[in-house]
Amino acid sequence: MIAKLEELKQRFEEVGQLIVQPDAMSDMKKYSQLSKEYKDLEKIVTQYDEYSEVLSNIKNAKDVLKTEKDEEFREMAKMELDELEPEKERIEAVLKEMMIPKDPNDEKEAILEIRAGTGGDEAAIFAGDLFRMYQRFCEKNGLKLTVLDLTEGTSGGYKEIVSTVTGHEPYGTLKFESGVHRVQRVPQTETQGRVHTSAATVAVLPEMDEVDVEIDMNDVRKDTFCSSGPGGQSVNTTYSAVRLTHAPSGLVVSCQDQKSQLKNFDKALKVLRSRLYEIELAKHNEAVGAQRKSMVGSGDRSDKIRTYNYPQSRVTDHRINYSQHNLPAVMDGEIEEFISQLRIAESAAKMEDGAME
C-alpha cells in the first residue's frame, strides 16, 4: 500500500506542476480533467501525510521502549503507542477506501427508466408507486427529477416513464436501483382479497456525452408528433415531441417534456446514447466476466433485486439480504439506508478484489 501511495503522491506533484503551466488553460477540457484529478489526489495525499507522521511517531515510541531505561519515559512511550496504534488502523481503513477505483460515471447525470412488468394493470400501478418513491427521494436529497416521456396505465400508474436526474452524483447515487422490483400485495382490482405478485423494471443509466458514444445520424430516423404528456396544453398543438429510431439496434426513444422540438431532440439523443452505452457495457462485461452475480454496482434490469411485501410491511434487497420493516416510509422515498448498505457491499467487494490481485 505504501508503494502505491508514493506513486499517487508523485502523480499529485506532477499534476500540480501541469496546472500552473502558462499554456495549461489553452485546452479547457484537459485543464478541467487535471483540476479534478488534483483535487481527488489532494484528499489522498493529505491522509497519507497524516499516516506517515503517525508511523514515524510509532517508530520513535518503539525506539524509546528499546533503548530507554527510565521507567517514566518508557511509560509515556507505552501510553503514546496505545493512542497511535488505533489511529494508524483508522487512517489505514480510510486510505484503503479512498484508493478503491471510482466509477467515472458516478458524477454524471442519470436517466431513470421505469417500466411495468408482469402483473398487468397492477404492475403499471406499482411502476407509478416506484416513480413517486424516487421522486420523493430526489426531493429530500437535493436532486432534480424531470420527466421526459411517459405512457400511462389504463387503471393508473405508468406502463413506462422516463426521467432525467440531475444534481450531485445522480448516477452514483441511484445506480444500485437497476433491476426488477417485485411487489406482493392485494391489488386494487382484486375482489377476493388475495395477495398478488407483480413487478416493474427499473433501469438507471449514466447520461452519455457525444464524445463517450458516437452515433451515425444516418442510422437514426427522426419523427415528430404532438405532445400529450407533461409538456402541457401549450405544446399539444405543435409538433414539438420527438421520437428517434436507431436502425442498427432497433432502439426507440421519445421525448416530449420541452416546448422546443430542438430541446426534445437533444434530450432524446442523450437517452439514445445512454441506452447504446448500456448495451455495449453489457457486452463488455460478459466478454471479460466482470459482472458480479450479486449485481451490486452495475445492476441488471433482468435480475430481481428487491421485494416490497405489503402484508408484512417488509422491504428486502436480495443482493445483500438486507430487510427493513417500514414499507410506508420506504415508498415515501426513504431508501437512503438501502443505498448506503449497497455502497458498503460494493466497497467491500472491490477491496477484496484488490487484495486478491
Image: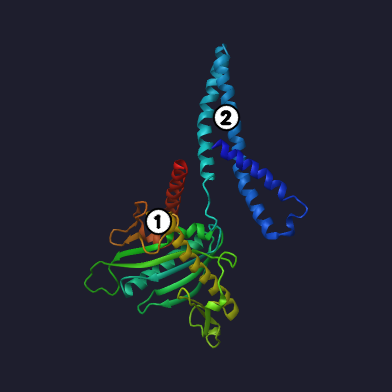
* Circle 1: element type: loop
Residue occupied by mark 1: 295
Which residue corresponds to the image point at 52% horizontal and 21% vertical from the top-left? 78
Q: Quadrant of residue 207?
A: bottom right
Q: Position of residue 235 (x, y in %)?
A: 55, 84
Between 298 and 199, which is closer to the camera in this rendering? 298
Of the residues tagged 2 and 1, which is closer to the observer?
A: 1
- Amino acid of disc 1: Met
How crowded pointer 1 is (Cα within 10 Å; few <14, some 14-19, many 20+) is rated as: some
Which residue corresponds to the image point at 46% horizontal and 41% vertical from the top-left? 355
Q: Position of residue 114 (x, y in %)?
A: 42, 69
Residue occupied by mark 2: 55
Which residue corresponds to the image point at 57% horizontal and 37% vertical from the top-left? 3
Between 131 and 301, which is closer to the camera in this rendering? 301
- Amino acid of disc 2: Leu
**Residue positioned most to the bottom:** 237
Q: How many marks?
A: 2
Give left or right: position of 171 versus 156.
Answer: right
Q: Quadrant of the N terminus?
A: top right
CA gap, disc 2 to disc 1? 38 Å
